[in-house]
Amino acid sequence: MDFTFTEEQLAAAEAARGVFAGVAPDAVPSPALTTGAVSEHFDRELWDRLAQADLLSLLLGAEYGGAGLDAIALCLVLRESAKVLARVPLLEHSAALATVQRYGSAELRDRLAARAGRGEPVLTVAASGRTGHDPAELAVTARRDGGTWVLDGVQTAVPWAYDAALVVVPARTEADRSVLALVAPGGEGAGAEDSGSGSAGVTVAEQVSTSGERLGELRLESARVAARDVVAADGAWEWLRELLVTGTCALALGVGERVLRMTGEYAGKREQFGHPIATFQAVAVQAADRYIDLRAMEATLWQAAWRIASGAAGALPAAGDVAVAKIWAAEGVRRVVQTAQHLHGGFGADTEYVLHRYHAWAKQIELALGGAGVHEEALGDLLAAHPLG
């Protein structure tokens, strides 16, 4: 078996490093120094650079101006973005766009794919459900009414809701099937021209994430969405959710790797009793344990991304590998930042030092789309349904 990345995947990661080289993590707005959201909008300048580098269209086919790459390439780019705390909707936009290409109608793909691959319109996904602890597809109901679908319900903690022109909203039909509706929220930056739906019956209420980013609670009251803007293909929501969760694992890995590197550099310079603290056995053992966490996070991430990219069969559905990856990502990134704070001492809590920003981002990523406990339960359900051996 060949576990190496392809030249095209490595080229995407190299291009991402070039784009993100100009991002200074210590200049990223700090939630500890800001009342409310750290900013009203994401980093548009960085978004434009990503578009110019063709990194927003990685998963699109050549017919839409994309590179035709896969989930592995996307995760390599997301990993680099997290190392510098890049404030862009790269995961949500890319995952939504890939789902439209894979499951959407030809008319929807032709109308949306190429433009979204250039960064306009911006897409996001409502994936947290009503409370953040319930299945997202059960938080909104959808019923067909002639040439439109009527949506009712609430989706909480929608990332970049105030910047997105379209929000991909999972909903449940009367036939107990999941559909994906492309809703124009009508907020700042939204463009109803990107959808035949308009924004009647759609409101957005501001929320703030642990990392300080501006989220939105999306409320739908008899909101009408044109049938052409609804993806009703079987498996579309499940595939999108798995890609989102796996991408979140890539973000966790990027944060964890940068934090452990910072910790190593600090421990190599910080002296106690005339010696760098990195030479103390207790410090070295803790750092080694966190290195093991990162390698486990990495191995499970690439297994999940490979299952999504290849569609290969396994003892469990791909959702099992995705659950294992998120369990390691959630617990691993938490342990990495906690150890980093401990080994940095009081310096780690200094708001003039960048580590506290990574800590806030790590906590947000840990719980996004379900913490370790949620995915342990999901994995248990899969094992019960697919006995091994």
Image (cartoon, rainbow, N blue to C red):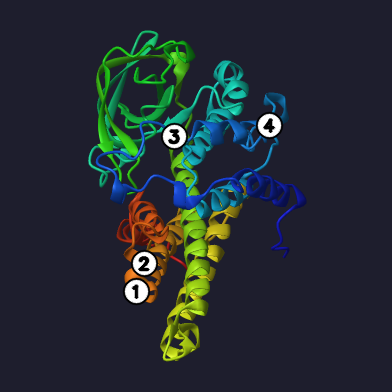
**Residue 16 percent coordinates (x, y):** 63, 46
315 vs 207, left or right, is right
Residue at the spot 46% in from the left edge and 41% down from the top edge: 87
Q: Residue at x 44, y 46 (%)?
A: 28
Residue 372, by quadrant, is bottom left
Task: Tell me, yes or no, whether the two marked residues, 1 and 2, touch with CB atoms within 8 Å.
Answer: yes
| Residue 263 visible in rendering | yes
Nearer-N-terminus badge (3/1): 3
Q: Pointer 3: residues within 10 angstroms few (<14), some, or many (20+)?
A: some
- Residue position marked by numbered label 3 in the rendering: 42
Q: How dense is the environment of label 4, judged by Cα within 10 Å: few (below 14), some, or many (20 and up)? A: some
User: Foreground mark, 4 or 2?
Assistant: 2
Q: Distance between the residues labelled 4 and 2?
A: 41 Å
Which numbered disc flags the more N-terminal residue, 3 or 2?
3
Question: What secondary structure is marked by label 4?
Answer: loop
**Which amino acid type is shown beneath numbered disc 4?**
Gly
Q: Which residue is denoted by mark 1 in the rendering?
A: 345
Q: For the point 38% across and 65% down, which residue is it?
A: 331
- For the residue pair 348 and 64, the one nearer the viewer reads as 348
Mark 1 or 4: in front is 1
Proximity of marks 1 and 4: CB atoms separated by less than 8 Å: no
Counting from the top left corner in percent of width and height, residue 13 is at 66, 50
Q: Is residue 59 above or below residue 108?
A: below
- Please give the residue where the numbered disc 4 appears in the rendered image: 66
Residue furthest right as drawn: 7
Structural distance between the alpha carbons of marks 3 and 4: 23 Å
Residue located at (41% from left, 27% from top): 163
What element does badge 3 sit on? loop
Q: Are marks 4 and 2 in contact (CB under 8 Å)?
A: no
> Which quadrant would residue 216 be assigned to in this image?
top left
